Image (spheres, rainbow, N blue to C red):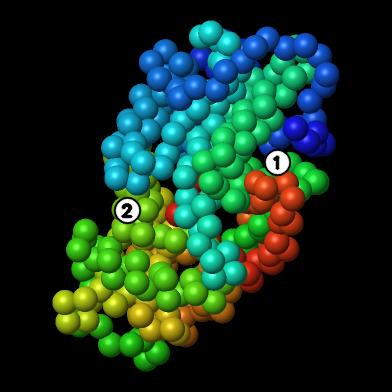
Amino acid sequence: MVSRPGCAVSHTRWPGDRLVSNDVIPQQSQAKKAPVMAVIAAEGRVLHRVLGAMNRTACDGQNRQACGTVHTAQTKTSWGGRCQTLYALVNGEDVFASAEQYDLTGVLDGRPVRVCGIGRVLSRPSQSGRDHAHVLVERLFDEGARQGAEIGLLFSNTGNGDHLVGDFRTLRFTNVTLRVAESPRHGAPMTMVRGGEERDLAAIVAMGRVRAKPFRFHFDRDVDFIRYAITTKRLLAGVGPPEVRQLQFFIAEEGITAAAYVVLSVVGNVWTLEECGDRDPSGARVGALLQALIAREPGMARPIIRAWLPSGFLPPQITITSATPSTQTVRMRMLDRRATTPALSSDDVLFWRDDLL
């Protein structure tokens, strides 16, 4: 395996045990003899311990029970049951590291590719200096390559290890704050605004594929994936205290077909645009939809709207008031060591917030 430079990490408590590392990026291993370890799907007592460590990182600070509820519900969705597995690096029942692995389908330069995604990486420090996160990530990538994956993606929510060198390339994103014009003059006409439903997912897939086509790299987001993404955000809202967080999914309908949509996480006066889509290339229906949602409560303070927006997408009713680098990143590498990882700029990739698993 290739050694990589170390990085600073933050720490949380492993229930009844030692420290774990939060959002660890593979580091350089030392050549000390270590116990024989196995990579297993986390079940039973191992799963209980892993979920206890994940609760502060993967479940927005929710307790272990809430984290377990979210994980169980995710794996019962069609996409989660097929494509999501929680793994642990163990010696007997002693857990050294854990990570979520995702079987994804992507498109690179117009060609479908299988992708091995890894996220929610946790590790505990080793007295021997051995980097358990590195061991687990490398084994999962190696197995992904054996199963036919061409690309490895490492998801990070903290930005740790941005200085990582070698065969990883870092895909970076920009957080923008949006202002929506109060005047509806620029909005395309809408016959109905309503809550999103299961029957809308096929139209959402079609909108997304048209929007994604110009980008060099993106996920192939089918109905099951979109259902999984929205379900996950809805679960995270549902397991928290009542009224603290909401998930809002709205459709702009023309005739009987969804013509635009938005998925919003709402915490107080802050709206986070998780994803959106529009049959209109200008995005005018998305802008008009946001105008309609703001107009529901004219006496309330205007919401703060935060988002990631694809390159070239800015509805005419919207202006960007601020932009800052996101701490969330994705690191990419080709799993065939003979292949060169493509040099992709932020304009070359399309990721919605819902895509960061």
The picture quadrant where one finds residue 160 is top right
Residue 58 in the figure: left or right of residue 126: left
Ranked by sequence position, the earlier of labels 2 and 1 is 1
Residue receiving disc 1: 160
Give neighbour class at mark 1: few <14, some 14-19, many 20+ (Cα, 10 Å).
Answer: some
Q: Does residue 189 sit above or below 198 in this rendering?
A: below
The picture quadrant where one finds residue 197 is bottom left
Q: Amino acid at mark 2?
A: Asp
Front residue of this view, candidates 339 and 208:
339
Residue 277 in the figure: left or right of residue 4: left
Count of number-bearing discs: 2
Q: Does residue 98 sit above or below 114 in this rendering?
A: above
Q: Secondary structure at mark 2?
A: helix
The picture quadrant where one finds residue 161 is top right
Residue 1 in the figure: left or right of residue 111: right
CB under 8 Å between discs 2 and 1:
no
Q: Does residue 90 sit above or below 11 in this rendering?
A: above
Residue 210 in the figure: left or right of residue 348: left
Q: In which quadrant will I find the N terminus? A: top right
* Disc assigned to residue 224: 2
> Which numbered disc, 2 or 1, marks the residue closer to the eye?
2
**Which residue corresponds to the image point at 69% horizontal and 66% vertical from the top-left?**
345
**Which residue corresponds to the image point at 64% horizontal and 71% vertical from the top-left?**
347
Q: Amino acid at mark 1?
A: Asn
* Residue projecting furthest to the bottom: 185
Residue 308 appears anywhere in the view: no
Residue 212 appears anywhere in the view: yes
- Residue 48: where, in percent of width, then height? 42, 18
Q: CA distance from mark 2 to mark 1?
A: 31 Å
**Which residue corresponds to the image point at 50% horizontal and 35% vertical from the top-left?**
100
**Which residue corresponds to the image point at 33% horizontal and 39% vertical from the top-left?**
81
* Disc assigned to residue 89: none
